[in-house]
Image (cartoon, rainbow, N blue to C red):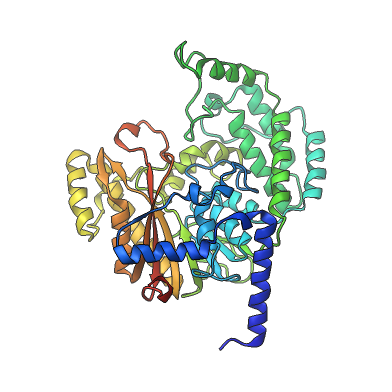
Amino acid sequence: MKSKNSNRLHAAAEASATQGRERLGDSVSPDCQALLQKLVRQYQRRKQPVSVTFRQLLPALNSADRFNHLIHPYPAKLLVHIPYFFLANDLLSMPGDIVLDPFCGSGTVLVEAQLANRRAYGADANPLARLIARVKTTRLDTAAAKRTLNEILKRIPSKPSGGRPDVVNLEHWFYPSTARQLQCLREVIMRVRTPAIRDFFIVCFSVCVRKVSLADPRLSVPVRLRLGQYPKDHPFRAKSDAHLRRLRRVRVSEIFKRIAEANITRMEQRQVVGTTFAEIVCSDARKLMYEYSLNGNRNKPLADESVQLIITSPPYPGAQKYIRSCSLSLGWLQLCRTAELRACKARIIGREELSNAERSSVLPTKIAGAEKRLAAIHARNPIRAKIAATYLHDMRVAIHEMYRVLKPGGHAVIVAANNRVAGMEFRTVDYLQAIAGECGLFLTACFIDAIRSRGLMTKRNHTASVITREWILVFSKGGIPAWSR
């Protein structure tokens, strides 16, 4: 039985969360708890995936710029409606509970968990993603940030003092005058003394890097724009050529100023409500530990059965090029040297490359349906088959880690999609569900949501796929919960 003190704390937390949602304008949304219960029971009766269009279900969240979610672009971001829906109830978690996203990307789940008055833990292999997520979940002194922005703009030197920045193919992606201006701006930002404010402006600088680069702004993976790249009658021809001409005379400080001012406003809106604790704990979903902790837990594993709810969208096998899409920022921010890019890619689950040694050591996945499909893929492209098999091995370890840290009675919401490997359908959703089942997670519900394509263009795009549907798998640890029956 809960103590009176515990009940008072819970009531206060719930009141804070409710009050926060009202201030955010989320009170106009439907009763997510009743709706979730209804949808889960519908699945339990039919044992067939239930079609749910989250954009229509939560139209109040369709605004393109919700709080600080857009302070930095990031490829294949999770639709904000999904974490909101699964957090706006007390069926899966309660205020004050720990919510984990082991593939947190730029922090969509973490921000929504904080807004729902949960404690948030995140992990991601991409150092840029970890930086963005940390900034988005850290309270910013916006008045001090405005003063600091003015100081930064006043103190930008006319010439850089350091050597050539270690940015991959620097001359290919930036005009010389642009690179020189970026280097001067970066030097003054790095002299900001307050860590939270410095990190905020580093994120703004990263946005600026991509905007003033010669990469096509329409694509996530950098592709160099050239004059006349599009045919004369193409709708993008005039706009693309005008963009390139503007870049020859661009003033980087003006672009940076506009980005920083807009992001300060976003951070001010983000802080309308009181938020709970958030921490980026580590870089590897396969080994959940306090890798970056400063509170004495450093290098210790996350405690067994300590997490109430996991909401995550793992990468797809060989489909997402996170490191390539972020390579310019990684260099300018000194998060990854050019010589380290290959090693950084190798730490990503769902990576696109394997070394020769790794290719020769791939073992069977022990998933019947996957083995049959991998054999067919192998006949067409042995390397792609081994990359896909490695993905399933990595995801098995990651899902077993999720099971380890999840409390009995806890839940895991995994967003996944099927795609194509070497031109053949790869039923990722079925394979991840099989792995979850083997470690003891019970499928409570399965939803299907139509989405815009989350593919990133590559030279292999014609043999991959455009992803148009996502599966939202809701698992429970310890059996199907009573409320779902």
- Identified at 36% across, 49% down, the residue is 417
Say above or below: 369 vs 485. above
Residue 273 placed where, x, y %? Answer: 70, 59
81 and 418: which is toward the camera: 81
- Residue 34, can we see it? yes
Say above or below: 25 vs 302. above
* Apparent side of residue 10 relative to residue 191 in the rendered image (left or right): left
Question: Quarter of the image containing the N terminus?
Answer: bottom right
- Identified at 28% across, 62% down, the residue is 434
Residue 199 placed where, x, y %? Answer: 68, 48
142 and 125: which is toward the camera: 142
Residue 350 placed where, x, y %? Answer: 38, 49
- Identified at 46% across, 47% down, the residue is 344
- Identified at 49% across, 24% down, the residue is 224
The residue lying furthest to the top in this view is 232
285 and 441: which is toward the camera: 441
- Residue 302, can we see it? no
* Apparent side of residue 45 relative to residue 116 in the rendered image (left or right): left
**In terms of image quadrants, where is residue 429?**
bottom left
Say above or below: 342 vs 391. above
**In terms of image quadrants, where is residue 231?**
top left
Residue 93 placed where, x, y %? Answer: 52, 69
Count of labels in the image: 0
Question: Quarter of the image containing the C terminus?
Answer: bottom left
